[in-house]
């Protein structure tokens, strides 16, 4: 059992922290910007709530964070009451936020100056993966810190892997989102085409899902796409945030991402349709808009 802090109890962080307490058996202290959410978590799982990230991190072996973006991350780590001001030497900070590779490297350097380690460890699997403790975790950072943190991360993970030095976890998450963007648009167009051609979508998917066209998106999203149901899952707003980060990185490193850039604009169309909180599979809605 380790002494653990978790900063950020959103739709992902709330169940992830719960798995650290229940499945992992760790001594967990939580912090959330809205204190009522932290108190609700404590009432459900036990553990304790702290008034600031710094207070939550004090004396902990591992400090996890899952917040919104780079600025939120700086606030909970390097801000006046940030966790980095309370972490002890030898501890490990594990950032599960989907953020930039730049902030990952910045935090790794800041942690090293203070005598502890920082790992960028974004996750994939969405809200369902977080709730079921079946996330994929892509880690960047020091091998020794990773070896110490990996058994703790396993509390909410199905797959954990060290991708390389600081920033490599975030870069790997960008690769993940590039794949998803193209797959979802392809599936949306395929279902739209099948309908327009007068085919039975269920029969079509039943056949092609057993061949080379098969994907997680097809298996898990075709039914709700066909039914026009999108009030769940990974929100369009979140996907556009992720795409913005990776497209900025592509501009820096020179990668050409024409399809991803196009799908980003398609998601902008969905936002204009009122689908900011719809699941990413809602790309089909813009194709069938009357």
Image: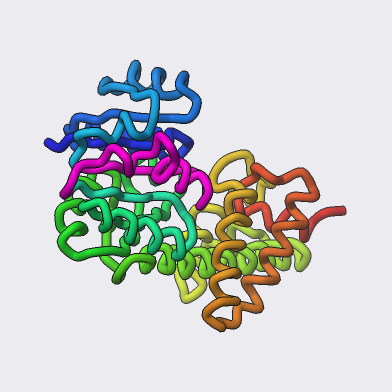
**Residue, x 18% and y 41% (percent of image)?**
61
- At 43% from the left edge and 30% from the top edge, which residue is drawn? 32
Is there any visible trace of residue 188 in the rendered image? yes
> Coloring scheme of the render?
rainbow
**Magenta region:** 62-90
Q: Is residue 95 left or right of residue 259?
A: left
Q: Residue furthest top?
A: 43
Q: Give x and y (percent) for residue 5.
A: 28, 35
| Residue at 25 percent of width and 51 percent of height | 114
Please state which of residues 186 and 155 is positioned toward the viewer in this rendering.
Answer: 155
Quadrant in the rendering for residue 251 = bottom right
Q: Is residue 36 left or right of residue 169?
A: right
Residue nearest the viewer, comparing 255 with 71: 71
* Residue 245 lies in the magenta-colored region: no
Furthest residue in direction right, as rendered: 290
The image position of residue 227, as x and y in percent, is: 66, 46
Q: Nearer the viewer, residue 200 or 273?
A: 273
Picture layout, residue 136 above or below residue 231 = below
Task: Report whether residue 137 is seen.
Answer: no
Q: Is 157 on the left or on the right of 188, as rendered?
A: left
Q: Residue at x 79, y 50 (%)?
A: 272
How far across and how far down the image is residue 161, in percent?
A: 27, 63
Residue 141 lies in quadrant? bottom left
Query: In which quadrant is the N terminus drawn?
Result: top left
As for residue 81 lying within the magenta part, the answer is yes
User: How far from the left and from the top, in percent, is residue 70?
Assistant: 51, 52
Closest to the observer, 262 or 36: 36
Compared with residue 91, is residue 52 higher up or lower down, i.e. above or below? above
| Total numbered labels placed on residues in the image | 0
């Amino acid at each position: 059992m380790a002494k653990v802090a978790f900063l950020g109890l959103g739709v992902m962080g709330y169940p992830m922290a719960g798995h650290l307490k229940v499945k992992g058996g760790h001594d967990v202290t939580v912090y959330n910007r809205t204190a009522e959410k932290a108190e609700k978590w404590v009432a459900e799982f036990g553990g304790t709530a702290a008034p600031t990230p710094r207070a939550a991190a004090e004396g902990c072996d591992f400090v996890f964070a899952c917040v919104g973006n780079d600025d939120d991350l700086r606030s909970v780590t390097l801000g006046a009451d940030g966790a980095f001001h309370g972490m002890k030497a030898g501890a490990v900070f594990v950032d599960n936020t989907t953020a930039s590779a730049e902030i990952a490297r910045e935090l790794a350097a800041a942690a090293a100056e203070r005598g502890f380690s920082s790992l960028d460890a974004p996750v994939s699997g969405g809200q369902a993966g977080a709730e079921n403790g079946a996330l994929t975790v892509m880690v960047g950072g020091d091998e020794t810190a990773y070896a110490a943190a990996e058994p703790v991360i396993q509390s909410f993970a199905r797959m954990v892997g060290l991708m390389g030095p600081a920033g490599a976890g975030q870069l790997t998450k960008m690769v993940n989102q590039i794949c998803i963007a193209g797959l979802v648009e392809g599936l949306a167009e395929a279902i739209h085409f099948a309908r327009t051609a007068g085919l039975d979508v269920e029969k079509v998917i039943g056949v092609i899902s057993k061949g080379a066209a098969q994907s997680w998106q097809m298996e898990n999203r075709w039914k709700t796409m066909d039914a026009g149901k999108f009030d769940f899952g990974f929100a369009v707003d979140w996907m556009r945030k992720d795409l913005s980060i990776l497209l900025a990185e592509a501009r820096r490193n020179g990668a050409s991402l024409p399809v991803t850039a196009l799908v980003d604009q398609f998601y902008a169309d969905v936002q204009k349709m009122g689908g900011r909180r719809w699941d990413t599979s809602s790309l089909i809605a813009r194709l069938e808009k009357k």
